[in-house]
Image (cartoon, rainbow, N blue to C red):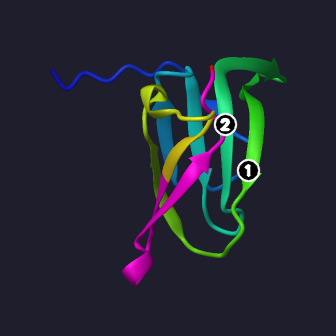
């Protein structure tokens, strides 16, 4: 019905956030940070408060090994994990033939 309800404001580890993707299989939020960072932050849906500001509880930050302008991420479900890995997809702005990169051995398969 187009109703929006704010549940809170949460700080992440970086200033520029390009994408948010929720992995229901692990209960984790994947936060893609673009701009000068190009990092993937994985957080739990819990948070801590410091001086009136709530921050997500970060589990890990992966530094993207390039300078591409990543605009979105997606991954296959936990049922697609084989040998502890599953594919991770990255969409690259102005990537031409590399507009979609696939990392076939993404290591996060468990909650």
Would you name the residue on which mark 2 appears? Answer: 42
Quarter of the picture holding the N terminus: top left
Q: Is residue 78 visible?
A: yes
Q: Dot 1: few (<14), some (14–19), or many (≥20) neighbours within 10 Å? A: few
Q: Quadrant of residue 77?
A: top left
Q: How many marks?
A: 2
**Can the viewer see residue 94?**
no
Rounded to the nearest angstrom, the CA distance separating label 1 from label 2 is: 8 Å
Residue 11 horizontal side relative to residue 79, left or right: right
- Residue, far left: 1
Q: What residue sits 84% from the left and 23% below the top?
A: 50
- Whether tag 1 and tag 2 are in contact, CB under 8 A, the answer is yes
Residue 90 in the image: above or below residue 6: below
Mark before the other along the chain sequence, 1 or 2? 2
The image's mark for residue 41 is: none
Q: x%, y% of residue 76?
A: 43, 39
* Residue 74 part of the magenta-drawn span: no
The quarter in which the C terminus is drawn is top right
Residue nearest the observer in this picture, 53 or 109: 109
Q: Residue at x 49, y 18 (%)?
A: 7
- Residue drawn at 70 percent across, 69 percent down: 36
Task: Give the x, y percent position of residue 108.
Answer: 64, 35
Q: Nearer the viewer, residue 10 or 70?
A: 70
Q: Which residues are magenta?
A: 89-110
Q: Which numbered disc covers residue 62?
A: 1
Image quadrant where residue 53 sits: top right
């Amino acid at each position: 019905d187009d109703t929006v309800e704010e549940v809170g404001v949460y700080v992440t580890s970086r200033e520029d956030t390009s994408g948010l993707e929720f992995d229901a299989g692990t209960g984790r939020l994947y936060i893609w940070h673009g701009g000068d960072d190009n990092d993937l932050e994985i957080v739990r849906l819990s948070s801590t408060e410091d001086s009136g500001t709530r921050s997500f509880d970060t589990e890990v930050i992966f530094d993207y090994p390039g300078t591409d302008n990543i605009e979105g991420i997606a991954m296959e479900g936990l049922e697609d994990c084989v040998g502890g890995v599953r594919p991770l997809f990255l969409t690259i702005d102005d990537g031409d033939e590399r507009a979609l990169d696939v990392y076939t051995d993404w290591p996060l398969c468990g909650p």
